[in-house]
Image: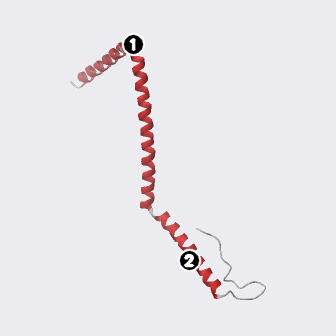
Amino acid sequence: MSTSTSTSAVPRQGTGEKPSVDELRADVERTREELAETVDALGARLDVKARTRARLQTLRQQAGARLEAGRAQAGDLVVRARAGATNQQGKPTPLAFGVAAGTGAVLAAAGVTIWRMSR
């Protein structure tokens, strides 16, 4: 969108001469081009459907990137957890057994509590 104004259609200062027909035609053509650019810019701003599609595409790309980053981070955590839960021969460590037993006990207690409350 251009804000420049053309002065070729205005009589030349000091000489009092009027612009030629070719200068007027060139000025009209420039004005038409500027007007077309302005209308296109306004049309793009008012096209809510196209703007919404573009924004949705951007959000999808961002979500996909975040998902991939989360998957990579989760994979790293799994590798670290396995490394901490097993010894060099790949067998579970006593700590891993304790964590598994504690988790099982908590889940069992929660299940019994919920079962008793529902009766």
Quarter holding the C terminus is: top left
Type of amino acid under label 1:
Leu
Colouring chosen for the image of the structure = secondary structure
Tell me residue 57's x, y (percent): 43, 52
Q: Between tags 1 and 2, which lies in front?
A: 2
Tell me residue 44's x, y (percent): 48, 64
Q: Is residue 61 left or right of residue 111?
A: right
Quarter of image, res 26 = bottom right
Name the residue at 34% across, 15% down: 102
Residue carrying label 1:
95
Q: For mark 2, give the secondary structure.
A: helix
Q: Is residue 96 left or right of residue 41?
A: left
Give whichever of 48, 54 is nearer the camera: 54
Chain-order first, disc 1 or disc 2: 2
Q: For mark 1, give the secondary structure.
A: helix
Type of amino acid under label 2:
Arg
Tell me residue 47's x, y (percent): 45, 64
Give whichever of 118, 28 is nearer the camera: 28
